[in-house]
Amino acid sequence: MAKKTSCLGLGVALSTRESDDELNLGPLAECMGKGKIVAGCIAPHPPHLVYAENPPQNEPVAEGGWEQLRWGYERLRASLADIDYDAIVLLSPHWQTYVGTHFLGLPHFEGLSVDPIFPNLFRYHYNMNVDVDLAKAIHDEAEAAGLPVKMMENPDFRVDYGTITTGHLFNPDWDKPLVVISSNRSTAYYSVEVMQEIMIELGQVTRRAIEASGKKVVVLASNSLSHRHFTTESEVPEDMSKEHITSHAMHLWDMRMIDYMRSGQAQRILDEMPEFTEQAIAESDGGGLSWLLSTLDVPDYPAILHGYGTIIGTGNAVVEWPCHAHEVSEA
Amino acid sequence: MSEGEVVASFVVPVHPHTVLAPDQNPGWRRLRDAFDQAAQTIRDLETDLIIVYSTTWPSIIGHQIQSDPNPEWVMVDHDFHDLGSIPYSFNIDAEFAHAWNQANQERGLQSRCVNYKGFPIDVGSVVALTLLNPDNTIPAVIVSSNMYANRSETTVLAKSCMDVIKAQGRRAVAITAMSLSNRMFTDFIEPSEDKIHSLKDDEWNRKILEFLEQGRLEDVGQLSRTIHQQIRVQKVVAFKPMWWLSAMNGNRNDLTGNILAYEAIHGAGGAVVHLDPTPSGVGDKEYDEDDVDYYHGERGVLDTVDETESGADESEQEDTPDHQGPELWEPTEADGSVNTEAAPKPVGAYPHARKVGDMLFLSGVGPRQPGTNDIPGGPIHDDNGNPLDYDIKAQTHAVVNNVRRIVEEAGATMDQIVDVTTFLVDMKRDFQGYNEVWAETLGTVGPTRTTLAIDALPTPIAVEMKVIVHMGE
């Protein structure tokens, strides 16, 4: 099998774009920059993790809980501490769009994010910056590829809690701008296969736009693996004696996917995505995992598992593909 | 106080176009006019409560009920953010919300109230309340749509709502915020290009509307699973709002239906339908499915007991989750015995009550809940006997409700109760709270009463009542 050449900035530098005209690249094929993806991660977003951390931005107070995953996030942050990057590109399954794929299109958002499902755990005062230039570049590249896309420019828009949760856990200082991509619900409309076709295309245009941008970027898929919830909550939500996977079958699917990740078999994940999504009721239905693997050019090197744990019965893994360590020289 | 009732029901669409852009498309304008007509009907009916079941508020932990008396924010739709923003400030009946939540638990449902500043009220609820209650004069309540809820859970959710409507003597309007076919165009379109996504969707929508126009709400409920398979995006299990609305109307097929508008909103089927409870004189059941009063389904999933290893099937498990104490028995049958699924199972071989002539004698009644065996207000100790804090008022209320169910099953009424003996396990701690609940409930009826302190009861409860009823003529 041919070695993938993922995460590379391919070719000629592209100066900072000055006008929209420059973005009509199919545009990028002709004027590549030195941008690159330095890492790609699965970064799950259950609000329980932020709740358990007790950051000052979140109103509820916890006695801890879900340490295996929170320590996993700590290891992920430590792993990237010495890696220089300019922006974070994140796809969140809780910004659900049925009409195309949308991108946050204003430079700054702040407000209160209350989880509509677990409001007892997550009422977070957020304040985040958006790399609008990069968002627009990905948007334009996607549009040129024929995908329905839209920039979200309503200042009253409330950023979804999946974005906030992953954003906080990955970068608690919020000192890097984000590009936030909505989750197109094509699985619900058509099938996992159609979703994956769209997400692979979106991943490819994401990668091309990043490479053309001249920026160094981390890409995050904010999603769980198996996704069957308990429908009851213990009196103390962080009571870890009540936390476990909902069924053995879910555990087996999670471990199978993690094994593929750790052994550099991303293509098999894509191949088995329909069965995994259906049988594990996996949050991969939102397209994040397919998009991530496509953005990373379907890596054939091992990912690093930083942590695995369950949250109200769902399976969650913090996983890093360390692209920076697997760059292949153009020569 | 007159007995409460649902004075009208409405089906309304969820997307923001009718609020933000009614004049960009003639169909959206007709939907908006229909909303305005519905709002006028609601006012004319002297409605004192609007209840919204919204399909765009999903929940996981049972059902959630909005209980913030005045939720305020600005809603922006995830898809149609370019249409603009909808500021809202709603008048929520928090007292009703809490009573409904309690009634849900008494019928075996997982349920909770939410009252948090900044809670994101969903688009369907915002559109419905903005247009149907524009001046906010009528108090409202909003309930979520549980992702995993099946027909029985959704039906019981309506029945517990009706318990409270009747108890409070309300004139309520029931709203389902929902699309018919919910398949939108997946690309951007000009407003003038809007139409129902496909002929198949349109045909099914018209079939549903034909049923509704004939007042055959129960039939639509029975078709819900088929409708979901045919014309719904496979996101939310089943066409469940029809289950809720049907149960809110007594699962009838003879309502008086009126289709106020049916149009496309970005391809989805949007309709404003008025269902008047006045019998239309037509309608017959094509389908039938067992009715359900109490929820006995999966709600013990946090327990670590492996049910599959126990060999117990669902019917055997229904009264056992979280059960502490002695084995539960089926109530015994004998001449004059009165038993009901609406009361907790006995802890021995005896009936819930026994009728002798015009007298009715109840076995000791505690606060355990039928179906779940939960104890409102909490158990008095844990599995190891360690004392726990508990709410004697909640327990006493639950005892009175269980007594009511048995008495009514016998065909008697609460005001026919003539004598009560109450047993408390902690007289010093609990007498005052018990006495307050008594004054509000049985105290208004006037039976004689004896209150005794005892060491313990068979289950971890604090209060039990022995009741005698004179049924009279």
Image (tube, coloured by chain):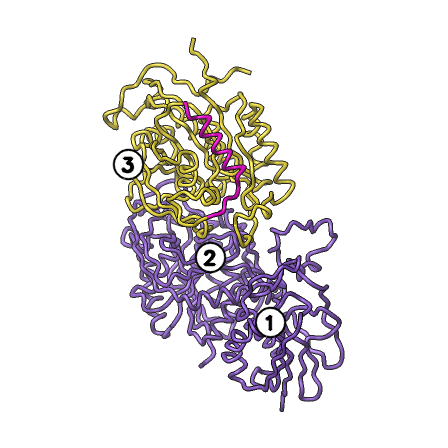
- Residue extending farthest to the bottom is B473
Tell which of A275 and B104 is nearer to you: B104
Residue type (three-letter) at the residue carrying disc 2: Ser
Q: CA distance from mark 1 to mark 2?
A: 39 Å
- Give the class, few, some or many, for how many residues have Cα within 10 Å of label 1's Cα (few <14, many ≥20): some
Q: Label 2: which residue?
A: B144
Q: Which chain, by letter, is purple?
A: B
Q: Number of marks in the image?
A: 3
Mark 2, secondary structure of its residue: strand
Q: Label 3: which residue?
A: A107
Image coordinates for residue B195, horizontal then vertical, percent: 38, 49
Q: CA distance from mark 3 to mark 1?
A: 62 Å
Which mark is on residue B426? 1
Q: Is residue B371 above or below residue B61?
A: below
Q: Are marks 3 and 1 on the same chain?
A: no
Image-quadrant location for residue A129: top left
Image coordinates for residue A83, horizontal then vertical, percent: 41, 23
Q: Which residues are magenta?
A: A62-82
Question: Does residue B235 appear to the left or right of B338 in the view shown?
Answer: left
